[in-house]
Amino acid sequence: MNKREINQLVDWITTAQRIVIMTGAGVSAESGIATFREAKDSLWAKFNPQQLASPEGFANDPETVWQWYQWRRQQVLSASPNPAHGGIAKLQLKFDASLVTQNVDGLHQKAGSPEVFELHGNLFRDRCNNSVCSYQRDSIDVSAPLTLCPQCESSYLRPSVVWFGESLSAHVLDQVTEKTARCDLFISVGTSAEVYPAAGFADLAQSNSARILEINPNVTVLSTRADWVIAEPAGKVFQSLMEALEK
Ligand code: BV8
């Protein structure tokens, strides 16, 4: 970003009354966590998400799905937040900014974000695959094998994330809908904006006359609808923004 762009970004942030920041896998890319849809090392390139991140996938091959998540947990445990996570946390502390993430890696919390709306759950919790059973546990043993739920002993334990075809938490959706409908600046960071209902929040914000800013080095389905696109890596953008705000 050049000086003019940095000044414009500072102006958009400091003149906004209520900000919503929506993040996706791209915000963790500079922490070394593979994104979902980009080629080369993307998670999806190696595995078919519909076969793994879905109830059918788990029913068909629970062992493979379980091991895929254990591998992802190991990836995350060896990763650190990057300047994008840190900058977003600082914005939340300095301004009326709400953070909504599609990510399940917990790196925003690690970076000090005071409040994180996790639309798709969190990698580091397990729950019983039988939705009637209430059992859940923190999942910190990344070498634990696939196991039956110790409470009902009828279903396997699985990561407490939202799979394709599963509904998101109504409580989280209500809170995010309320924040998004009232914001005047919506910042989409590091998401291909393809997964719903998350991808619909930018439209909700725009229908309430919020400015839409996208931070993503690549073009997405949101890019043509955004009021401004900063086509740079999020870590670099937030690094420059923090330096400018701390002057
Ligand atoms: C739902 C958790 C109601 C798991 C995830 C058929 C049947 C059922 C549902 C559907 C259906 N058809 C469509 C749907 C709806 C479906 C959907 O949206 N499908 C899509 C694919 C069309 N949605 C659902 O199923 C949702 N539930 O609708 O419930 C329902 C119920 C029953 C029946 C019908 C409806 C649940 C969706 C949640 C799925 N779970 N994650 C896990 O993590 O394993 S989604 C997964 O994708 C992750 O959460 C990820 O965050 C998310 C979105 O992807 P992105 O974050 O955008 O990542 P991506 O790789 O795509 O993009 C990265 C971007 O970063 C790129 O643009 C890149 O350019 C950029 N980038 C790279 N580096 C950087 C960068 N940007 C900035 N800086 C950088 N350095």
Image (tube, rainbow, N blue to C red):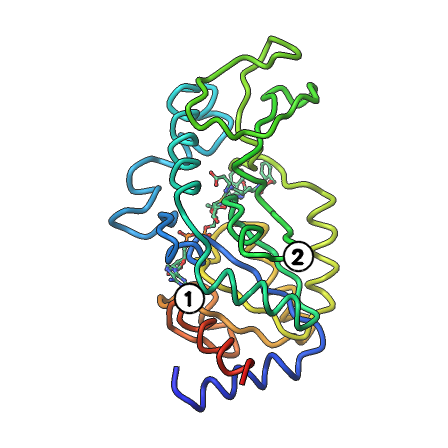
Mark number displayed over residue 50: none
Q: Is residue 180 above or below residue 196?
A: below
Q: Residue 40 at what x, y percent from top left?
A: 24, 49
128 to the left or right of 69: right
Determine the image quadrant of residue 211.
bottom right
Disc 2, ligand 1: is the CB inside 8 Å?
Answer: no
Mark number displayed over residue 114: 2
Residue drawn 49% across and 70% down? 214
Q: Residue 17 at what x, y percent from top left?
A: 71, 77
Q: Residue 231 at what x, y percent from top left?
A: 38, 73
* Residue type pointed to by label 1: Gly
Disc 1, ligand 1: is the CB inside 8 Å?
Answer: yes
* Residue type pointed to by label 2: Pro
219 to the left or right of 106: left
Residue drawn 52% across and 58% down? 23
Q: Is residue 102 above or below residue 96?
A: above
Q: Which residue is mark 1?
A: 235
Q: Earlier in the sequence, mark 2 or mark 1?
A: 2
Instruction: Specify the quadrant that holds the N terminus.
Output: bottom left
> Farthest front residue?
247
5 to the left or right of 94: left
What is the count of numbered marks? 2
Badge 1 crowding class, 10 Å Cα cut-off, few under 14, some 14 to 19, many 20 or more, is many
